[in-house]
């Protein structure tokens, strides 16, 4: 009996961790190339609404997932066009992208409020997970496995591949990378697009897997938490995984406490916990290093060529 | 063929023209997009951008909506100039309203001219205190103020929900989640009998003048601009970036708090869960539209107020959803950032097609 509860708690935890893991991983790659895209929340919302609309009208959740990644990619391309093409300020443009994502998702989502779809189910057939402990291995949906695979792939890509090395060089010293002959802007645009696609997937996880029902602004600031997660992870995919699952634990605690009907903590106070926890964690990270450098790519947020 | 040429110095004409170009492009794109998705695009744009300006009965509402936007944006612009990115003004706005409402609930049975100033002071302090948290974390521990200020606005909104559903719920309010209505001494006086126009509007204009004076004519304003534009030079000149961060965040928090209190003591007259409407985020657009200059921000606030009022009109005339207003506002910021390129670059006919632009 306890094992059933424990397993179910861990399943909730993985589900809470997956969207910010996906979005955070995308942003990590973007930032490694020296681009600070604060529009994660907006790109997630673009993915969430597109994924839901496509899944609703086509009846295929898979198609919805693919469309969500594409929508996130397109949103990131607006950002790339403005910051890389026209040299606009990255912070301001990222904020604009978030405001845009909130607007567009609530505009196109208005017709879907309250509609439901067939949610993204477990990847493997149910008899694989007959035993409760086996559910931990075989009971997740495809995006959970995909997010874990992507962590490994991104980690290998950044540390072991030639392209990964070039991407990091562009983020650490854009001028030198340019001098050797690498196309800084093209590489940055590609990294931004990858970040957007993963943010789109993260957003779709909300509308297709967590709550298969459309609600306005359903990501509730998770895009910003994904941004904080990248700082927490010191731009390392492995630590990002750890951070996302730690966050998942906090979010699960919030859900369990609500479900258990703990009355001495107000529900509003529980709803604050993810945001407060993020601030506490960011603060502890800074206390830990003292220098404030925290391993950030040296050219993060700096325009190229310099104005 | 056309090509981009870097200007030898930034164009002053484009600095002022590009916001107008951005507005025109937003109207044009909005018309096309909303026509494409099945609305009456022409009349939608007309309702959103033109109707509020040509119908005098809307002007009071424009002022009411512009005042908080201008006040918040004035503070944000100080920070943006110094590279301090306070994007949690929404939270400071809510905390200002909460602090002011706290005073209002304590003095509910009292009368006197001093009550409203005390509420305003509490509003300023509440907003500034909320902004002091990211300031402290930034200056002492180098924690990004972008993330902390934003996280704190989610916390502030939840705190508001907690108060109006719990300890501050009006016992005589039929169990609705809202505080008591403020008393006659606790609401902003109207500027004319029966008018919507309240004291907050002239105060916002005065604050813009004050900000213009401080930023343009004083050493502190100069320090803020130098720290933002040339951090290394600022260090040489003995300007303390940490102090500028504190000043920028406390000023923007205080102004957002005051705006929140004015909204609570003005149009709302109480606190309800509907209180946070996103002015703290829209003010970011206002600050950029106004080119981070106090006088420009007054015009920027007016433009965004037009879109709010016009958005409401378009809801009833062409059945445009409320979310469309947000879309127009975001498009405006996109185009503004895009047309910024014209300040530093110009389009010219390519003389020698073989040559590639640098």
Image (cartoon, helix red, strand yellow):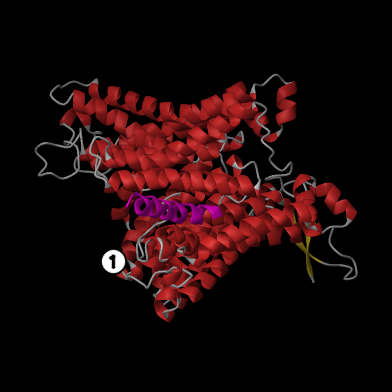
Q: Is residue A133 magenta?
A: no
Give the residue at x 37% y 66%: A212
The part of the chain drawn in magenta is A1-21
B240 left or right of B33 in image: right
Q: Is B171 situated left or right of B12 in this image?
A: left
Tell whether A124 sits left or right of B263: right
**B219 left or right of A158?**
left
Q: Is residue B46 visible?
A: no
Image-quadrant location for residue B197: top left
Q: Is residue B291 visible?
A: yes
Instruction: Answer above or below: position of A59 versus A36.
Output: below
Label 1 lies in what chain? B
- Residue B20 at x, y = what percent? 56, 56
Q: Disc 1 on helix, strand or loop?
A: helix
* Foreground of the two, A139 or B127: A139
Where does label 1 land, which residue? B316
């Amino acid at each position: 009996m306890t094992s059933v509860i424990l397993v179910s708690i861990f399943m909730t935890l993985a589900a809470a961790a997956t969207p910010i893991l996906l979005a955070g991983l995308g942003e990590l790659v973007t930032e490694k190339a020296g681009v600070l895209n604060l529009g994660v929340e907006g790109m997630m919302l673009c993915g969430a609404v597109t994924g839901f609309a496509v899944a609703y009208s086509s009846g295929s959740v898979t198609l919805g997932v693919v469309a969500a990644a594409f929508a996130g990619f397109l949103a990131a391309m607006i950002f790339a066009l403005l910051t890389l093409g026209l040299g606009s300020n990255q912070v301001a443009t990222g904020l604009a992208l978030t405001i845009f994502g909130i607007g567009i998702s609530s505009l196109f989502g208005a017709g879907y409020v309250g509609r439901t779809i067939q949610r993204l189910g477990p990847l493997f057939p149910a008899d694989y997970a007959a035993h409760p402990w086996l559910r931990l291995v075989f009971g997740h949906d495809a995006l959970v496995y995909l997010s874990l695979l992507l962590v490994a792939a991104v980690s290998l890509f950044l540390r072991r591949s030639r392209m990964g090395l070039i991407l990091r060089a562009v983020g650490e010293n854009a001028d030198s990378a340019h001098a050797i002959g690498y196309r800084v802007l093209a590489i940055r645009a590609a990294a931004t697009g990858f970040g957007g696609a993963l943010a789109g997937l993260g957003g779709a996880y909300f509308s297709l897997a967590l709550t298969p029902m459309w609600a306005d602004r359903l990501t509730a600031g998770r895009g910003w938490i994904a941004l904080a997660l990248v700082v927490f992870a010191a731009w390392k995919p492995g630590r990002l995984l750890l951070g996302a699952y730690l966050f998942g634990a906090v979010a699960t605690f919030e859900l369990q406490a609500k479900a258990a009907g703990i009355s001495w903590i107000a529900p509003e106070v529980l709803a604050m916990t993810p945001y407060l926890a993020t601030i506490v964690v960011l603060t502890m990270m800074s206390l830990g290093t003292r220098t404030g450098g925290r391993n950030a790519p040296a050219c993060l947020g700096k325009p190229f060529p310099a104005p | 063929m056309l090509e981009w040429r870097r200007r030898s110095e930034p164009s002053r004409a484009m600095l002022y023209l590009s916001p107008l170009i951005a507005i025109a492009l937003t109207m044009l794109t909005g018309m096309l997009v909303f026509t494409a998705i099945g609305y009456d695009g022409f009349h939608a744009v007309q309702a959103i951008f033109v109707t509020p300006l040509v119908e005098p009965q809307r002007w009071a509402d424009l002022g009411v909506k512009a005042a908080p936007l201008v006040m918040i944006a004035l503070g944000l612009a100080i920070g943006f100039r110094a590279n301090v990115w306070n994007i949690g003004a929404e939270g400071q706005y809510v905390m200002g309203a909460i602090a002011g409402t706290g005073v209002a609930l304590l003095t509910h049975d009292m009368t006197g001219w001093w009550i409203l100033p005390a509420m305003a002071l509490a509003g300023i302090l509440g907003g500034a205190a909320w902004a002091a948290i990211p300031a402290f974390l930034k200056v002492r521990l180098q924690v990004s103020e972008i993330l902390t200020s934003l996280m704190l606005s989610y916390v502030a909104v939840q705190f508001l929900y907690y108060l109006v559903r719990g300890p501050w719920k009006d016992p005589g309010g039929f169990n609705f989640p809202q505080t008591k209505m403020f008393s006659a001494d606790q609401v902003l006086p109207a500027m004319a009998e029966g008018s919507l126009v309240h004291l907050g509007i002239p105060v916002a204009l005065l604050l813009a003048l004050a900000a213009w004076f401080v930023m343009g004519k004083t050493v502190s304003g100069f320090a803020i601009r130098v720290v933002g534009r040339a951090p290394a030079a600022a260090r040489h000149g003995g300007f303390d970036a940490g102090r500028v961060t504190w000043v920028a965040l406390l000023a923007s928090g205080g102004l957002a708090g005051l705006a929140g209190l004015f909204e609570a003591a003005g149009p709302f007259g109480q606190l309800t869960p509907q209180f946070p409407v996103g002015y703290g985020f829209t003010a970011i657009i206002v600050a950029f539209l106004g080119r981070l200059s106090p006088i420009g921000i007054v015009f920027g606030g007016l433009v965004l107020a037009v879109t709010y009022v016009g958005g409401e009109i378009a809801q009833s005339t062409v059945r445009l959803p409320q979310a469309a207003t947000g879309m127009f506002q975001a498009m405006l910021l996109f185009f503004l950032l895009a047309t910024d390129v014209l300040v530093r670059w110009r389009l010219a006919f390519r003389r020698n097609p073989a040559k590639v632009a640098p």
